[in-house]
Image (cartoon, grey):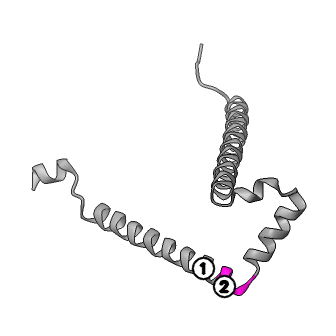
Amino acid sequence: MSTTKTTAERIELQKEEIKQHQNQLKLLLHKQKKEERKARTHRICVRGAMLEGLLPDTILLSDERFKAFLERTTANGRGREILAAIVAEQKKEYDANNAVTVQNSNTATPTAARATS
C-alpha cells in the first residue's frame, strides 16, 4: 500500500490547518482585547485615585459637576500648554530610550561570532 496522499487529501489537510490557524488567531485577538481592556480599567482606576488624592473635594461632586469641573480646568489654554509640554517631554524621553536600545542592538556581537573572530 502506498502512503502517498492524493492532491485532494493534501488540499483537505491544508484546509483543516487553515481552520486551526484561524481559530488560533481568533483566540489570540480575543486575548489581546481582554488584556487591553484590563490595562485600560487599571489605568482609569489608578488615575481616578490620583485625582481624588490630589483633589479630595471632588469626591463630593456628582458625575455631571465633576465632568464640568474637568472641562473648565482642562479646556483653558494654560491647561493645554502644560499637557503639551508634559507629552513632549515624555516623547523625548521615549525617543532617547529607543535610540539607546537600537544603538545597543546594532553594536551587540553574538557570542559565537566573537569566538570565531
Nearer to us in this view, 23 or 102: 102
Q: Residue at x 39, y 66 (%)?
A: 97
Amino acid type, callout 1? Ile
Going by the picture, which residue comes out furthest to the top? 1
What is the x, y in percent for residue 66?
Answer: 82, 62
Q: Which residue is mark 2?
A: 78
Q: Is residue 111 left or right of residue 105?
A: left
Residue placed at 72% from the left, 31% from the top? 16
Viewport quadrant of the C terminus: bottom left
Answer whether residue 79 is magenta in the image: yes
Residue at 39% x, 72% y: name it: 96
Query: Residue 1 placed where, x, y %?
Result: 60, 13
Observer-nearest of 50 and 14: 50
In the image, 41 versus 80, the foreground residue is 80
Quickly name the residue at label 1.
82
Q: In the image, is residue 53 above or below residue 107?
A: above
Please state the extent of the stretch shown in magenta in the rendering. 76-80
Q: Quadrant of residue 11?
A: top right
Q: Position of residue 24 (x, y in %)?
A: 67, 36
Tell me the quarter of the picture where residue 98 sits: bottom left
Q: Are marks 2 and 1 in contact (CB under 8 Å)?
A: yes
Taking the image as shown, residue 53 lies to the left or right of residue 15, namely: left
Residue at image x 22%, y 52%? 110
Q: Secondary structure at mark 2?
A: helix
Residue 44 falls within the magenta-colored stretch: no
User: Alpha-carbon distance for marks 2 and 1?
Assistant: 6 Å
Q: Secondary structure at mark 1?
A: helix
Q: Amino acid at mark 2?
A: Arg
**Quadrant in the rendering for residue 38:** top right
